[in-house]
């Protein structure tokens, strides 16, 4: 359906301001025309910020520009990243789309419910993003683990195969519809400060992993990835603020060195309260 009216100029809140739309992140898209049609779907629904992680073909290739049907600006202004971690580093809330259930303790939402929550986070000024995986394989477990919520569209269970642009359109359409009329913004819990960005969380998890390896907790190398995914999930469910992340950095550091300093300062025979506790 063609219905573009150039007399209308949509005004979108700038990135980082209250009400700003989420970022769309395409992970390893394979074909230029798929990037172009995804950009077309985005612009139809008022989403204007596109990020690409290691695209196989250029987003400004002739096929991509032709497939975008006029959404050229999204393609020329799209930001490129080498890793998913870098693409979401400045975001505070990330959603991952998938058609396959995985054994992960992540909340799973249909697009309509997910965008209602997304709009609430965006409304208060949090930076949010939505991940879409490669056309053939979708997102990996490790990539899904970087998100807070999994979005799963309730489609025909016997045939639930969407192409990349269709998947982007389903979620983008729900986003656009959620902003029409007088639909109330859902209430979010008050955290007492801004949410930590993904980069701040990644630094915290890297610090924690180093210390868990050093103390022997992660001594089984083959199990480290799955164990760290589970540990990250526990912290991510808490919705940590930036200040809480800094506090946890301090706790992790002192758990390694703090008790040693205290024991060195004790008088002979004085074991203190900590010394009387059982070790485990």
Image: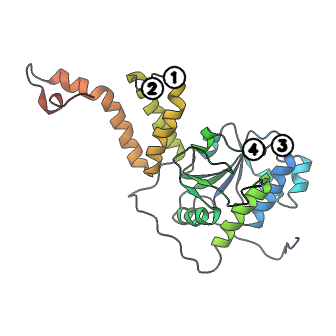
SS at badge 3: loop
The residue depicted at 54 percent of the width and 51 percent of the height is 148
Q: Which residue is mark 1?
A: 221
Towards the viewer: 205 or 62: 205
Marking on residue 84: none
* Inter-mark Cα distance, 1 to 4: 28 Å
The 10 Å Cα crowd at callout 4, few under 14, some 14 to 19, many 20 or more, is some
Horizontal and vertical percent position of residue 127: 57, 56
User: Residue reaching furthest left?
Assistant: 269
User: Between disc 2 and disc 4, whose residue precedes?
Assistant: 4
Q: Image quadrant for the N terminus?
A: bottom right
Q: Is residue 12 visible?
A: no
* Inter-mark Cα distance, 2 to 4: 31 Å
Q: Which residue is mark 3?
A: 58
Q: Which residue is mark 4?
A: 134
Horizontal and vertical percent position of residue 251: 33, 37
User: Between disc 3 and disc 4, whose residue precedes?
Assistant: 3
- For this view, does 218 lie left or right of residue 113? left
The residue depicted at 51 percent of the width and 28 percent of the height is 224
Front position among marks 3 and 4: 4
User: Residue reaching furthest top?
Assistant: 268
Q: Which residue is mark 2?
A: 218
Horizontal and vertical percent position of residue 218: 45, 26
The residue depicted at 61 percent of the width and 64 percent of the height is 115
* Inter-mark Cα distance, 3 to 4: 15 Å
User: Between disc 2 and disc 3, whose residue precedes?
Assistant: 3
Q: Are marks 1 and 4 in contact (CB under 8 Å)?
A: no
């Amino acid at each position: 359906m063609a219905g573009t009216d150039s007399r209308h100029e949509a005004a979108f809140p700038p990135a980082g301001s209250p009400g700003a739309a989420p970022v769309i992140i395409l992970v390893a898209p394979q074909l230029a025309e798929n990037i172009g049609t995804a950009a077309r779907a985005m612009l139809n629904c008022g989403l204007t910020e596109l990020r690409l992680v290691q695209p196989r073909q250029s987003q400004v290739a002739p096929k991509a520009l032709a497939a975008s049907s006029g959404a050229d600006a999204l393609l020329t202004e799209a930001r490129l990243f080498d890793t998913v971690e870098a693409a979401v580093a400045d975001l505070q809330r990330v959603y991952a789309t998938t058609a396959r259930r995985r054994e992960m303790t992540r909340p799973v939402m249909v697009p309509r419910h997910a965008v209602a929550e997304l709009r609430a986070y965006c409304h208060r000024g949090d930076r949010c993003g939505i991940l879409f995986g490669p056309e053939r394989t979708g997102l990996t477990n490790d990539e899904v683990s970087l998100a807070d919520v999994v979005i799963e569209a309730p489609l025909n269970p016997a045939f639930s195969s969407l192409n990349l642009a269709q998947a982007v359109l389903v979620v983008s359409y729900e986003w656009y519809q959620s902003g029409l009329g007088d639909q109330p913004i859902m209430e979010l819990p008050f955290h007492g400060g801004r949410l930590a960005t993904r980069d701040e969380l990644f630094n915290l998890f890297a610090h924690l992993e180093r210390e868990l390896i050093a103390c022997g907790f992660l001594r089984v190398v083959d199990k480290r990835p799955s164990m760290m995914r589970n540990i990250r999930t526990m912290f991510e469910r808490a919705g940590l603020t930036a200040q809480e992340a800094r506090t946890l950095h301090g706790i992790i550091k002192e758990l390694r060195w703090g008790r040693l300093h205290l024991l060195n300062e004790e008088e002979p025979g004085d074991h203190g309260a900590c010394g009387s506790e059982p070790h485990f």
